[in-house]
Image (cartoon, grey):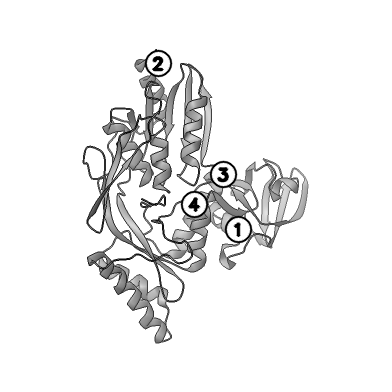
Amino acid sequence: MSGRDLFCPPRRVRRGAALTLVVASVLATGATTGCLDGFDRKSPSPSGRSAFAGHHEDVSDAAAEAMADGKSPVEAAERAVSRSGDRWGAVYSPGEYEEFEEALDGQYTGVGLWARRERDGRIAVTRVRAGSPAAEAGIRKGDRLRSVDGKRVDGRPVTEVVSLLRGDATDAPAGTAVSVGLERGTRAWNETLRRAKLPTDSVTVRELADSVTVIKAAAFTKGSGDLVRSAVADAAAGARIVLDLRGNPGGLVTEAVTAASAFLDGGLVATYDVRGEQRALHAERGGDTSRPLVVLVDSGTMSAAELLTGALQDRGRAVVVGSKTFGKGSVQMPRRLPDGSVAELTVGHYRTPSGRKVDGRGITPDLEVEESALKRAEAVLSGLGGPS
């Protein structure tokens, strides 16, 4: 495998809706998803001819015919994907696809603030990234957003506000300006911010009482696997680990395998097929196999995050706590269409080390809980003891 992603979360929604969801994820959690298989990111194109390749050709032909007839190639490609029955297939404009790529590299274009809608409908700033355009303008946690580029934001969904800040409607690049109306107490003022490329926070760590370290992996973007490994290595002696994968939509499968290497001493992580050819993914040797480990999952745990969960569960390395995962275990590959848009279509599926299918089934936790999952994880860890 060439080190690029093979597994990605579902995008069987209209392109605009899919982009909105990803934008919200980027700003709210510092993460997003995508799927590639080692192809040049500017001109992805699978090789070989098979039933899967034929599927790609049908979509490409539909786009080319539409282009020749002066019609929308993207809409034609979407119809071809829909007719094929590929439930995970999707078509993206060049700008949308580049945004997914950017986020997979652990970056996003924005102003560096997080926000939420209060009960009264007003939009409050909940966090400001140090060194970001928002921070340099003096915006603080607790400030309220009144407007973005002259548009009132009170009562709007946070995802819509995020989209305005990022300039998604115009594919605004880094360096473009956005006017933000703010309020702090009785003071109201406007700031003009210039969007910038900012790093995402894909992995965060916090310490709980009773020597419990919680490692939250929000998505498997570039470098996140090594961050997980570093967090495990830096945990205090005797600390027990909670690996929180709730809401993790997947990302780069190589990063998930690297994360698995933090807890396994080599061995199988998953098997998969691409156009019928069987392949395998293995952890590196030298992982910490002694610390008690609980993995937290929910219905938002998808794709590469499910691959990691299944590996740790099958290998007897972790107790999985939470609710059943999403069930996205298929392999997509991208193809550049004649107009520059990209179709990502299914070419195979993966299995856990014991041979379990994930696609359409998900991973069932060892301990199923809907509420207070972290508290239950702590209780489980208390019964597992610590390394000797």
Image position, residue 151 (x, y; %): 65, 62
Amino acid type of the residue that numbered disc 1 sits on in the rendered structure? Arg
Residue closer to the observer: 91 or 380: 91
Can you identify the residue that label 4 sits on?
104
Residue closer to the observer: 34 or 288: 288
Amino acid type of the residue that numbered disc 3 sits on in the rendered structure? Arg
Q: Is residue 28 left or right of residue 376?
A: right
Q: Which mark is residue 166?
A: 1
Residue closer to the observer: 368 or 2: 2
Q: How many marks?
A: 4
Residue 362 appears in which quarter of the rendering?
top left
Q: Secondary structure at mark 1?
A: helix
Q: Which mark is residue 219?
A: none
Can you identify the residue that label 2 sits on?
387
Q: Residue at x 50, y 49 (%)?
A: 25
Neighbourhood count class around disc 2 (C-alpha, 10 Å): few under 14, some 14–19, many 20 upward: few
Can residue 302 be seen here? The reply is no
Q: Residue at x 47, y 34 (%)?
A: 228
Can you identify the residue that label 3 sits on?
119
Distance of mark 3 from mark 1, alpha carbons?
A: 24 Å
Neighbourhood count class around disc 4 (C-alpha, 10 Å): few under 14, some 14–19, many 20 upward: many
Q: Secondary structure at mark 4?
A: helix
Proximity of marks 3 and 4: CB atoms separated by less than 8 Å: no
Choose the circle earlier in sequence order: 3 or 4.
Answer: 4
Q: Residue at x 28, y 59 (%)?
A: 347
2 vs 3, front mark:
2
Amino acid type of the residue that numbered disc 4 sits on in the rendered structure? Leu
Choose the circle earlier in sequence order: 2 or 3.
Answer: 3
Choose the circle earlier in sequence order: 4 or 2.
Answer: 4
Q: Is residue 39 left or right of residue 199?
A: left
